[in-house]
Image (tube, rainbow, N blue to C red):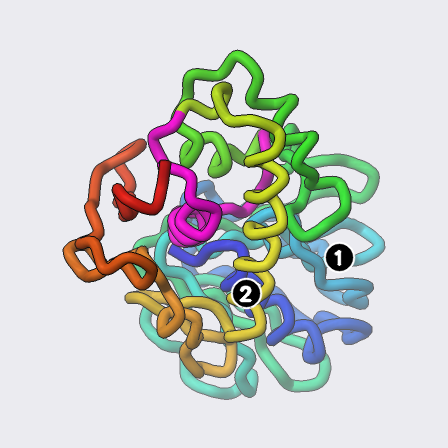
Amino acid sequence: MPELPEVEVSRLGIQPYLEQQVIATVKVHNSKLRWPVPADVKLLEGEKVTAVKRRAKYLLIESTHGTAILHLGMSGNLRVVDAQAPLKKHDHVEIILATGKSLRLNDPRRFGAFLWQRAGEQHTVLAKLGPEPLTALFTAEHLFEMSRGKKQAVKQFIMDNNVVVGVGNIYANESLFKAGIHPKKEAGKISLKRYQLLTPIIKETLSAAIKQGGTTLKDFSQSDGKPGYFAQELLVYGRKGEACVTCETPLKEIRLGQRSTVYCAKCQR
């Protein structure tokens, strides 16, 4: 599924087309997504888009009346096309701009979302989220304090959106490998010194993925249809049985929280 870098790349792709533009119409072709698309999204009609932001894996299209909250789910993607272009299968919601362009949410599995947040309110999906990993609020000290007393595996710990948002499966695998930390190690047994090593690695890994346009594995493509290229730089994810790039030991794979976890038994302790 799209992770934080892919969502950020999508935001960067659609932002120039939407910001400061007037929304002419919102068309809901299929309201049965992860949650029903609320009728209030029609309040966007006639509104100017004041900002296109991201919070965790949610895209926020802001206006004076409120904010449309988009989530790409497992297989969703966004495209900006001419409003007169034929709909594709699984184009569920579109925002038609006065410029004649249309932002379309395409989601074959329908695990995505298109929600509404009134001005001055906070939607429940955005409540209780941890800090953004690419901001100064995400620190080693924060991870250390949050981890005290936790027996949870560190990989699941850093993937917990209450701890830090957006560190999905791919980037948790990669970051722990670079930091030399075994993914099953209890979060509460990791020292501040090791969190001081891991934190900047998480930031660097996510930033590098954004620069490369995300990681295209099965479903993700950028808003212009081009693939992301970070998959070419993956060191462990999806490389079960292949040689470790550091020590040439065959990489192992286990399941943690029902997610594929690939690591080097020699390099990660």
* Camera-nearest label, 1 or 2: 1
Q: Residues within 10 Å of mark 2 (few under 14, many from 20)?
A: some
Question: Which region is colored magenta?
Answer: 163-185
Name the residue at 26% across, 42% down: 265
Q: Give percent across and percent down for residue 200.
A: 62, 50
Name the residue at 48% across, 20% down: 189
What is the three-letter code of the residue carrying label 2?
Answer: Lys
Can residue 76 be seen here?
Answer: yes
- Disc 1 is placed on an element classified as strand
Q: Give percent across and percent down for residue 112.
A: 44, 51
Q: Give percent across and percent down for residue 174.
A: 41, 53
- Disc 2 is placed on an element classified as strand
Precedes in sequence: disc 1 or disc 2: 2
Can residue 47 be seen here?
Answer: no
Classify the position of the C terminus by image quarter. Answer: top left
Question: Mark 1 = which residue?
Answer: 62
Question: Mark 2 = which residue?
Answer: 27
**On the image, which quarter does residue 138 sit in?**
top right
What is the three-letter code of the residue carrying label 1?
Answer: Glu
Q: Is residue 5 left or right of residue 66?
A: left
Q: Is residue 40 left or right of residue 185?
A: right
Q: Residue furthest left?
A: 241
Q: Is residue 177 magenta?
A: yes
Label drawn at residue 248: none
Q: How many numbered dots are placed on residues in this image?
A: 2
Q: Give percent across and percent down for residue 233.
A: 40, 70
Q: Is residue 249 above or below residue 87?
A: above
Tell me the distance, in whole angstroms, between the alpha carbons under discs 1 and 2.
Answer: 17 Å
Q: Is residue 61 left or right of residue 267?
A: right
> Which is nearer the eye, 82 or 24?
82
